[in-house]
Image (tube, rainbow, N blue to C red):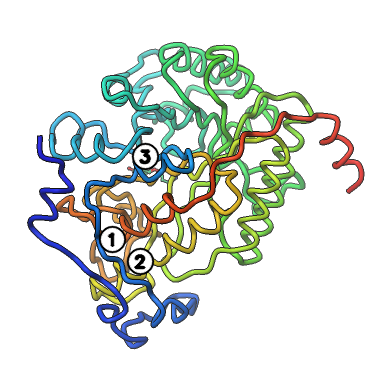
Amino acid sequence: MVMPILRALSRRQFVVGASACGSAAALALSKGGVASAAIVGDEPSWTLDSPMVTLKDAGQTPGILVGCAVDAARLRDTPDYAALVRSQANIIVGDNAFKFGTLRPTIRAFDFRDADTVADFAHSNGMKLRGHTLVWHKQMPAWFDQHVTAANAAAVLTSHIAAVCDRYAGQIHSWDVVNEAVEVNDGRPDSLRNTPWLQLLGPGYIDTAFQSARKADPRALLFYNEYGLEGEDAGSAAKRAAVLGMLRDLLKRGVPVDGVGIQSHIMAGHTYGAGLREFIQSAHQMGLRVMLTELDVNDRELALTTSYRDSAVATTYDRYLRVALADGYVSGVITWGITDRLTWLDKDKDAARIDGAAQRPLPFDAQFSPKPAFVAQRRALKQAPTVVPVLKRRTQLLVETASAE
Ligand code: XIL
């Protein structure tokens, strides 16, 4: 079988570098005035050499799992898409297949069709599988508000987790048990987001979720997954501190958390640096695994020129990954999709471009041809230091660190 990447190359070879990037005039005026001038003029050249080397190959040198979120329906009906995922990924995650709303059309019924598609695809191709996500305030089923009360919420939560984790037990590398539970602007001293689960069960819903998942599938690694941890701005710094505080408290209480997922929905042209690196170091020191779980690069602040956007997006991949992978503490890099044809950014009104043009946030374009972002990601993976084994958790140290603060 012809590899998709080779087929793509025979159609279009690319060399994109400083010459193709345009000038500072190509910059769009961004909302917050966040200029991407820093990335103009000093871009490396993103030449696609050695086209047969895939993203997952590149990750093998440092020992990093590499993969993407997948669309279950497209895996079923678009063979070229399935082939592209197969060629690039050794770990996959359903983009929507394992969410509460997808799995639970009614309070009693389960619909495992999409989740089974994703799990079977991972299994038949020897890939690892992530489960995303057991507890989240979004994409909840329509019946939730009507049927779930303070009296039955704990049972709904634990029975959902038990049923879903049990069905896929032994097949899951890692579960995003709880997604996006921190929101510093919701005004609570503990910085927890004011979600339906919090309102019904109090902060203990997080403990309950991890404990239920551990019980149902003791072999899966259990992750807390979060966005907005990446930037150098004050908001990101506050969120990082809040998430680390929450994780430390969970571990002190003996809640079975194995890792933290940094979603990594990042912005083309923005700077990522010490704050992100220190967060990863702190998580590692706590004995947690760290994965980049939903990486993509939003180009909504850039002018429309395709070559300019592709180069800027690639540069952002390069710089972000070099920071995140610098210490060898990140053991997986997962993009939220593999092809621009299926990016969520165009569907989300806060993320989409104002001019309505399609975003170009992923390593392959809408026709499945590799882009400069592919070259950048592959090179950053290949050059990353070897992954460091996770530290044995020392609960006592955590207690001491916390009381010294
Ligand atoms: C997105 C899906 O990709 C879209 O198809 C869906 O319409 C909305 O959700 N953070 C997450 C993911 O944790 O679950 C989201 O996935 C993207 C943002």
The residue to which callout 1 is attached is: 360
Name the front one of labels 2 and 3. Answer: 3
Measure the C-alpha gap from mark 2 to mark 1: 7 Å
Measure the C-alpha gap from mark 2 to mark 3: 21 Å
Measure the C-alpha gap from mark 3 to mark 1: 18 Å
Element at label 3? strand
Residue situated in front as seen by the camera: 91 or 197: 91
Crowding around mark 2 (Cα neighbors within 10 Å: few <14, some 14 to 19, many 20+) is many
Look at 85% across and 30% down and name the residue there.
396
Name the front one of labels 3 and 1. Answer: 3
- Which quadrant: the N terminus? top left
Of the four image quadrants, the one with ligand 1 is: top left
Judge left or right: residue 195 versus residue 359.
Answer: right
Look at 80% across and 29% down and name the residue there.
395
CB within 8 Å, label 2 to label 3: no
The residue to which callout 2 is attached is: 299
Element at label 2? loop
Asked if 377 appears above or below 226 in the picture, the reply is below
Give the percent coordinates (x, y) of residue 289.
Answer: 60, 36
Q: Residue furthest left?
A: 11
The kind of residue tagged 3 is Gly
The kind of residue tagged 2 is Asp
Residue situated in front as seen by the camera: 14 or 240: 14
